[in-house]
Image (spheres, rainbow, N blue to C red):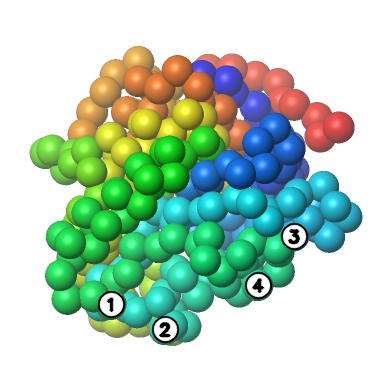
Amino acid sequence: MNLRVFRSAEEAGHAAAKAVAAQLARKPSSVLGLPTGRTTLAVYEELVRLHDIGEADFSRAHTFNIDEFVGVSPGDKRSYCSFMQKHLFTRINLPAGHIHFLNGGVRHHEAECDRFERDIASLGGMDLLLLGIGGNAHIGFNEPARMLRARSHRVRLALETRRSNAALFGGRLDRVPREALTMGVGTMLEARAIVLIATGRSKSRAVASVFSGRLSTQQPASVLQLHPNVEVILDLAAAEKLPQSGFDAQP
Ligand code: GLP
């Protein structure tokens, strides 16, 4: 596990964006796994800037977003799909046909999850998976549970997760869907490289689970310890429960 700690959330975001741009430079046809969330805003803003100055070319890349709300169609402005269009996809040269999502608006969720898995496999799997983390250590929408599922599936959302997503639904918790579709942890662990970004004190407990030396389905992000190529990018606040000190300066 490669850990990098930055002074600010913005610097951490820039470092994650650089990791994505470096992956695209190494392999222009990279298959990327992407998350949503407030943490990613600094990452996507920087990726757009890198794209604008010719340092991130998405023309041959494919993307797979890792989760979506059940009952929310891609065109719905509250969908994660719309979030991605607004903050990244409409601002870079990624061909529309290279954007892959779990469609939360379909009737048959199991078939949709199977299709998503097949599409990832047909492109040769993910080269780089960028992840955020929930305050309860969820990754994607894999919530703390008695069991974790390896493949993409429908999941019941934790109350804490629905609360932290309420802003997308006008601040109304009652309007946040109770279920979502998510990439499974087994599929995530098959990505050739994983970059996890977390910022802010509210993530520090969840981040500690990634370095605990213990695997627990109650802390889904702890499974990342099974992967041989994970880079964890933090700001100082998210790192405060880790037994290390010091930070990486932004070059
Ligand atoms: C959301 C998403 C995750 C994301 C996480 C962190 O609910 N399902 O994919 O990584 O929670 O979100 P934020 O960055 O807003 O804290």
Amino acid type, callout 4: Thr
User: Mark 3 and 1 residues: CB-CB less than 8 Å, in contact?
Assistant: no
User: Residue 212, percent across and down?
Assistant: 37, 20
User: Residue 43, percent across and down?
Assistant: 66, 52
Q: Determine whether 38 is above or below 176 in the image.
A: above
User: Mark 1 and 2 residues: CB-CB less than 8 Å, in contact?
Assistant: yes
Amino acid type, callout 3: Val
Nearest to N terminus: mark 1 or mark 4? 4
User: Residue 77, percent across and down?
Assistant: 47, 83
Q: Determine whether 13 is above or below 225 in the image.
A: below
Residue at mark 1 to residue at mark 2: CA–CA distance = 9 Å
User: Mark 2 and 4 residues: CB-CB less than 8 Å, in contact?
Assistant: no
* Secondary element type, mark 4: helix
Q: Name the residue under label 2.
A: 76
Side (left or right) of 26 relative to 227? right
Q: Mark 4 points at which residue?
A: 90
Residue at mark 3 to residue at mark 1: CA–CA distance = 28 Å
Mark 2 residue crowding within 10 angstroms, few (<14) / some (14–19) / many (20+): few
Q: Residue reaching furthest front?
A: 122
Identify the image quadrant of the C terminus: top right
Quadrant housing residue 151: top left
Q: Determine whether 103 is above or below 119 in the image.
A: below
Residue at mark 1 to residue at mark 4: CA–CA distance = 21 Å
User: Mark 3 and 4 residues: CB-CB less than 8 Å, in contact?
Assistant: no
Amino acid type, callout 2: Asp
Mark 4 residue crowding within 10 angstroms, few (<14) / some (14–19) / many (20+): few
* Secondary element type, mark 3: helix
Residue ID at (71%, 64%): 92
